Amino acid sequence: MALRKIITIGHPTLVRKALLIEVIDQEVIDLAHDMVETLLAAPGVGLAAPQVDVSRRLIVVDISVGEDPASLHILVNPEIVSQEGSVVCEEGCLSIPDVHEKVVRPHRVVVRGRNLEGDEVRVEGEDYLARALCHEIDHLDGRLFIDRLSPLKRALVKKRLRKEIARNESR
Ligand SMILES: [Zn+2]
């Protein structure tokens, strides 16, 4: 296992729609394990493959940040199959340093995907877990949480991060 570098806002991979994973091969398994290690080291509660510059549909979520092995979810090709309610809560992102803003998310979601063995799995999440799952699945569609803010709020955040964005865009 190895730590991967987390890319930040302005990097083109973060706004790209990630590709479906057709085959769960050793490369995908290694990527997933690296992502778990990277997530826990950050530390954070969720990480999507595009955040480590791999444009594929893989997320890892652990709202216990390594405290409870049962709360680690590794999902290949995750998709939201149902959602209920809405909750406004503050959110942040490892790819958008030092920014925390209130975002509306469903209260409850059911996510379907595959585990690393290739079996279909369903994860039901409420509140914080629902939020984390939605946030990471958004990354797979090239969407950042600030894209869910009002245009004015988003513009203010981008202004604050303009140096970071410019540095990443000029790569
Ligand atoms: Zn994020």
Image (cartoon, rainbow, N blue to C red):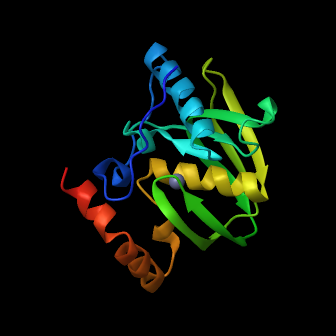
* Furthest-top residue in this view: 26
Q: Residue at x 55, y 43 (%)?
A: 47
* Horizontal and vertical percent position of residue 56: 42, 36
Q: Residue at x 73, y 35 (%)?
A: 66
Answer with left or right where residue 106 lies relative to residue 39: right
* Horizontal and vertical percent position of residue 24: 50, 19
Q: Residue 89 lies in what quarter of the image? A: bottom right
Q: Is residue 107 above or below residue 41?
A: below
* Horizontal and vertical percent position of residue 86: 72, 70
How many numbered marks have been drawn onto this rendered protein structure? 0
Looking at this view, is 76 or 155 the one in front?
155
Q: Residue at x 47, y 82 (%)?
A: 153
* Furthest-left residue in this view: 170
Answer with left or right where residue 162 lies relative to residue 141: left
Q: Residue 27 lies in what quarter of the image? A: top left
Answer with left or right where residue 129 lies relative to residue 17: right
Q: Is residue 77 above or below residue 153?
A: above
Looking at this view, is 52 or 15 the one in front?
52
Q: Is residue 8 above or below residue 62?
A: below
Q: Residue at x 43, y 35 (%)?
A: 20
Looking at this view, is 14 or 34 the one in front?
34
